[in-house]
Image (spheres, rainbow, N blue to C red):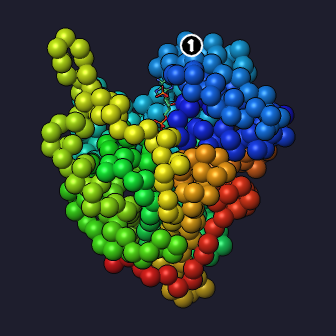
Amino acid sequence: MSRVIIIGCGGVAKVAIHKCCQLDSVFTDLLIASRTKEKCDEVKKELEGKTKTNITTAKIDANDFDALVKLFKEFKPEIVMNLGMPYQNLIIMDACLECNSHYLDTAAYEPMDVNEPKWRERYEKRVKEKNFTAYFDYSYQWEYQEKFAKKGLIALLGCGFDPGVSQAYVAYAKKHEFDRIDEIDILDCNGGDHGYPFATNFNPEINLREVSSMGAYYENGKWISIPPMSIHQKYNFDGVGEKDIYLLHHEEIESIAKNLPEVKRIRFYMTFGESYIRHMNCLQNVGLLGTKAIDYEGHKIVPIQFLKALLPDPASLGSRTKGKTNIGCIFKGIKDGKEKTYYIYNVCDHQEAYKEVGSQAVSYTTGVPAMCGALMILKGYWTTPGAKTVEEYDPDPFIEALDKYGLPKRESYNPVLVD
Ligand code: NDP
């Protein structure tokens, strides 16, 4: 018997809602709360008669602390799953503390406006001191460690696939396959085709901000920053075939570097097609990726938000996306005194995901781990309180749940390595 609130009702949230409702013996009471209540009502209707989960819906602006507290106090959730935008992570964490609820999200905090002076000052200091250039970083959420720990609550940070499962794979490799891990390459391949000239498979704002920013990797205790998309090569993915992979900065590099300090190098690669990159560069060149509001004929418009309104909604790509994703981690390290390599990954089919929950595989591979993360907390598999990332918990029950609920692992003991 668990009472759960899901905030947001986009691509990822819809999958998580479907998966929670498949486990109706655990997720007995679910409140879906989002900015557009009609979307919540639509999902509730889709699930009518298919689940015993008691679903209610509400309109919420996650920027409004008082409204969040009121909603949480009325519903009394054991956990709040924040599957909306990362801009509201801190305010939702504050509301969870106020109402004694666990918290979960799928992306590290970043501000909507990266030119906001107070935030910018701290950012510039971080860039100068650590050469850490990404707009997202865990430092803001790690500051909640003591507050959550004191109340015996968990704030589970970044529990999608990457971040999320990627870190469970790291913890799993450390527990079962290696005495020491030296190098980790996280590879995120989307071999799906939606047929549009340009669309993003998850929230366009977050996606385009991430991809158009400086790339970075972690080596020998330092951040190495590189111009956007300037390191790339080809990799042949199981189930997908050969794709171009590009080195990006990604949030789990920061937490893995902190939690497994023996690892000498951590890199993250994502696949992109030529058309995606051409469109993104063009949109950036004309200023449409800007996050600062401009004045247009008396209206304030944030360029990237305007662009989001023009692009296809990622939640609508399900029926048209064909192909597979392949996401996982390649490790180099030492076992029993000998050098060893190991690759653990998942292959997910866009059309299979659509058949099951009406969504494409990028939303599926994020929504399923979010449900499984909540399950770990609700069933008492993960109990250490505080603001924690996935690699800090026992990976076994989580990976078992992923195997069972739609994202089974595959392994290779002789993988092709990335140069
Ligand atoms: P969508 O844009 O599809 O959904 C976002 C939802 O949040 C929408 O329903 C939106 O409402 C709602 N929302 C936005 N602002 C507010 C607000 N102020 N108050 C209440 N609700 C709000 O995004 P996705 O589902 O694609 O992505 C969700 C999250 O998952 C993002 O943070 C993304 O970065 C993360 N993600 C993580 C991955 C991982 O592997 N870890 C992979 C993919 C995504 P409305 O319907 O009105 O727009």
- Asked if residue 378 lies left or right of residue 334, the reply is right
Tell me the kind of residue under disc 1.
Answer: Ala
Residue for point 72% across, 35% down:
47
- Asked if residue 118 lies left or right of residue 295, the reply is right
Confirm if mark 1 falls within 8 A of ligand 1. Answer: no
Front residue of 403/227: it is 403
Quadrant, the C terminus: bottom left
* Element on which disc 1 rests: helix
Q: Tell me how many marks there are.
A: 1
206 versus 267 height, above or below: above
391 versus 376 height, above or below: below
Residue 341 appears in view: yes
Residue 315 drawn at (x, y percent): 50, 40
Residue 137 drawn at (x, y percent): 39, 43
* Residue 125: quarter of image: top left
* Residue 288: quarter of image: top left
Quadrant, the N terminus: top right
Q: Residues within 10 Å of mark 1 (few under 14, many from 20)?
A: some
134 versus 397 height, above or below: above
Residue for point 57% across, 61% down:
349
**Residue under label 1:** 67
Residue for point 53% across, 85% down:
414
Residue for point 17% across, 14% down:
297
- Asked if residue 135 lies left or right of residue 342, the reply is left
127 versus 351 height, above or below: above
